[in-house]
Amino acid sequence: MCEKCDSSVFGLVYDEKAVGFDLLPITARQINLAKKCCRDALEALKVMHTKGFVHLDVKPENILCKNGEGRLADFGNTFKANTKLPPIGTSGYLSPEHLDAHSKNKSIVSDPKMDIYSFGMTLLMILYPQLASGLRQAQYDAEDAYWAKEAIVKYHSVLDDVRESLVNSNDPMDAFIASMLDPDPQTRIDSQQALATFNTLLGNE
């Protein structure tokens, strides 16, 4: 973790002093800075994944900004890939396979694709707070229901609706986020693909 950072990506968009998720007055400059810092964090994720590690707690609060550059923070949940673990991480950013493991009272096997889903949720939080709010709430509801099957099914339904909305927008950035929110880890893009796509999208803006 870096010291004396200017803000987290969360703090660029949301009021960190508020109890809930109150949006700040957002400028195009703030959004661009948030995306740049996320891109830097994604590059760090790619390095971690290449070295065989999984972060398992990617979220806006763990992407810090310093002098216009992003740094990935909080490695307390980091494990080697393919490690059998109890489900860990922050509710609201957990991958679908996390939730399915919770519902079946099973362990997860740490997979870099879990970080990619969480990164997709992070971008959704920044660019589309309303869409993100509904999806995060569906995870909270599942947690409150002790991961009951019905709650997990509802979450998957909300996820399908969010992804459909993103794909139907015909915006390349939206399609990129949808590809990271793919409920199937086998077809979800990996960090190398994600970084290449994100670099291209930011270069075209």
Image: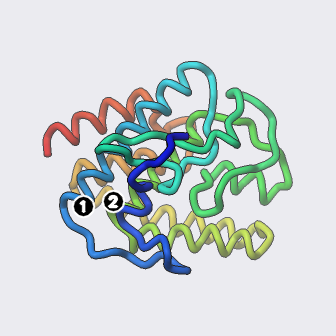
When the figure is inspected, residue 162 is found, relative to residue 176, above or below; the finding is below
Quadrant of the rendered image containing residue 19:
bottom right
Q: Is residue 47 above or below residue 142?
A: above
Count of numbered circles in the view: 2
Element type at marker 1?
Answer: loop
Residue type, label 2: Leu
Which residue corresponds to mark 2? Answer: 166
Q: Is residue 31 left or right of residue 115?
A: left
Q: Amino acid at mark 1?
A: Ser
| Residue drawn at the location 44% of the way across and 40% of the way down | 71
Disc 2 secondary structure class: helix
Residue at 42% x, 63% y is 11
Disc 2 and disc 1 in contact, CB within 8 angstroms: yes
In percent of width and height, residue 55 lies at 61, 38
Q: Position of residue 172 (x, y in %)?
A: 23, 48
**Residue under the point 72% across and 54% down:** 100
**Taking 6 as reference, is 32 left or right?**
left
Q: Residue lying at the far front in this picture: please name it.
A: 4
Mark 1 packing: few (<14 Cα in 10 Å), some, or many (20+)?
few
Report whether 187 appears left or right of 171: right
* Residue assigned mark 1: 169
Q: Residue at x 56, y 37 (%)?
A: 113
Q: Nearer the viewer, residue 123 or 34?
A: 34
